[in-house]
Image: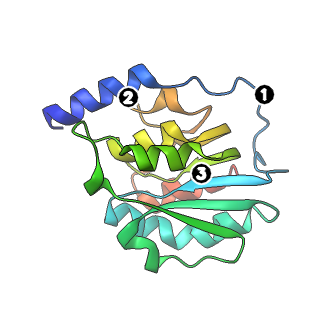
Amino acid sequence: MTFREKIGWKVLSWKIRQPHEGRVSLPGVTAGVKNACIVLPANFDDFDVVRTILPEVIERLPEARITIWVRDNFRSWLVINEQCTVMSYEPADATKLGMPDDRTRAQARANEFDLMLDLSLTPELYVAGLVKEVRAELKIALDHPSTRDMYNVLVETEAGDQGKRLVTLLKYL
């Protein structure tokens, strides 16, 4: 981890909004979701794994309008349906501390969601900064020490295989 990233993670931890403090019933946390946000990883290797399960994630949100945040140069790889809106982000446009630029942050804050699902397999500072800006009552992700305070549902798994980690996450949707 570079010095810049260490500073960025520290700044992000100071700015984290505390998640909505509601009761969550698992599994089936997506029941009744009308407006959902899915954040895809910026790292291509992680994105390549995640994009294979994205259709199943979308299928589990049958009545929701879905906004998908994806790195700009990965857009063409997505297989989505008409209920999805795609928003782009570009880590190359990050601030000096590796956070999303003002335009991207404003776009992330523009809507309020019932559910935000971060499909990142390993935490990335830029994506974590984007997730922090998304307004959602329920924020779900795979557990990682760097991002624990950002979500109100964390899925823990000991699986070393990235695909198995995602399957564990899917069990709760």
- Left or right of 130, for residue 125: left
Q: Type of residue at label 2? A: Leu
Q: Which residue is mark 1?
A: 23
- Left or right of 115, for residue 102: left
Q: In the image as oriented, which residue stretches furthest toward the right? A: 32
- Left or right of 21, for residue 97: left
Which of the marked residues, 3 or 2, is nearer the chain's N terminus? 2
Q: Which residue is mark 3?
A: 169
The answer to whether the residues at label 3 and label 2 have Cβ atoms under 8 Å apart is: no
Q: In the image as oriented, which residue stretches furthest toward the top? A: 14
Q: Residue at x 40, y 72 (%)?
A: 74
Q: Residue at x 51, y 38 (%)?
A: 133
Q: Which residue is mark 2?
A: 12
How far apart marks 1 and 2 lie (CA) works out to 26 Å
- Of residues 163 and 122, the one nearer the viewer is 122
How far apart marks 1 and 3 lie (CA) works out to 19 Å
Q: Residue at x 79, y 51 (%)?
A: 33
Q: Type of residue at label 1? A: Arg
Q: Position of residue 72 (x, y in %)?
A: 39, 67
